[in-house]
Image (tube, rainbow, N blue to C red):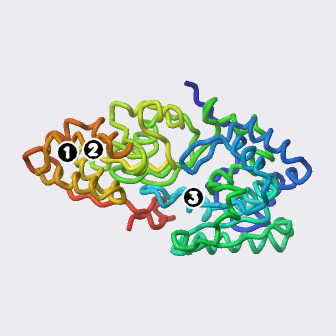
Amino acid sequence: MGVRMRAEPVLSLTEAVGSLPDYLAVGGGAGLALVRELSPDQVIARVRESGLRGRGGSGFPSAPKWETLRSTGRAGYLTCGLADGEPGTFKDRFILRRNPYQVVEGMMIAAAVLEVAGVFVVIDRSYRTEIIALRRALSEMTADGLLGGVVVRWVLDPDRDSSIGERCRAGGTHNVETLAHLPSILRRGSEWFRSAGTENSPGTTVFTVCGDVRLPGVYELPLGLPLTVLLDLVCAGAANGGRIKAVFPGASVAPVPASRFDTPLDFDQLRAVGSGLGAAGFIAYDDSACVVAATRLLARDQCPETSEILQKIEAGDANVADLLTLRSKGRMVAGALAAFEDEFVAHLGRGCPHPRQLERPKLVDFDEERDCTVKS
């Protein structure tokens, strides 16, 4: 599978933009201006030609999603949400910090196409840096007339606020990164967007890599590069000089073993090997880490029985029947067992053969001086 790399320098999703005048100076706002001259069907056609797929985890094509939402014929709100609740993911927060203007422009493009009354911004109130950046962008763009009367409401306690309800269903939920791609697609065209990535997964995406690598961080790269390129060339390999043996793409899909590190990083190829791209947040573990312990930490929020069994296995108190039970306990847990069965079996009747203490990765900040994510 060929991976396309853009030759021309472009304003990336993660390049810092400090003010609205700076954003407008590099072409910001042009996509939204074009949308207001076209019909919704014409805009959807352009997005379909680009092949844009949702960056929040599902990878569902954006154009068919918009067509389905428009077919309901109900006015309401669309929702802009972050995927950064997934372990090991920081990309949406990073995009909002670097260039919130492109996210707001993307919101307005989607709102115009879906003909909704407004936008709900769903973000945890603890993300103070991102909230400040987005409020600043909204204020500047409102003063400049770019919002066009679209109402933006904040939901700062997503787990408690039930006010979204029926009003947002007409517009659906849109990931921050997905929205951030829209201005450039409209301004530069679908052929430009497809000049990076692969045929079925075009464009770039923003990867977060943490764990046992030398250079953890946030990287915007073309879709379709092999996982080994991300681990060995971009992140400089294992931090302790050993080898990476497992990569967990979040907590909802199966981990990728070293034998599959040649798999292209796109939606379909990772799914074909039993894993998934998810929100492009990758947690790498080297050969000193226990895969059972890593699975237990990432499965912490799943059913109590799963956690109990994984604790038994790690302590050496489990039996074969426990392993058989795990085969039906979700994609991540069952996938870890399938890919690392020997390591799970090695725990039966004995203590953990890799007793290194692991922590559940929670990325809370980005160190601009060291250019890497910071764990809690």
**Residue 92's mark?**
3
In this rendering, which labeled residue sits more in front, label 2 or label 3?
A: 2
Q: Residue furthest right?
A: 37
Separation of disc 2 and disc 3 at Cα? 32 Å
- 266 above or below 35? above
Q: Residue furthest top?
A: 1
**Residue 288's mark?**
none
- Give whichever of 144, 83 is nearer the camera: 83
**Residue at 12%, 44% in the rendered image:** 348
CB atoms of marks 1 and 2 within 8 Å: yes
Q: Amino acid at mark 1?
A: Asp
Q: Residue furthest left?
A: 349
**Residue at 17%, 53% in the rendered image:** 312
CB atoms of marks 3 and 1 within 8 Å: no
- Check disc 2 and report the residue beneath it: 326
Q: Percent from the top left, x then y, of residue 252?
A: 42, 48
**Residue at 40%, 44% in the rendered image:** 236
Q: State the image quarter where residue 61 is shown.
A: top right
Q: State the image quarter where residue 79 is shown.
A: bottom right
Instruction: Pick whichever of labels 2 and 3 is earlier in the sequence.
Output: 3
Mark 2 element type: helix
**Residue at 55%, 24% in the rendered image:** 1
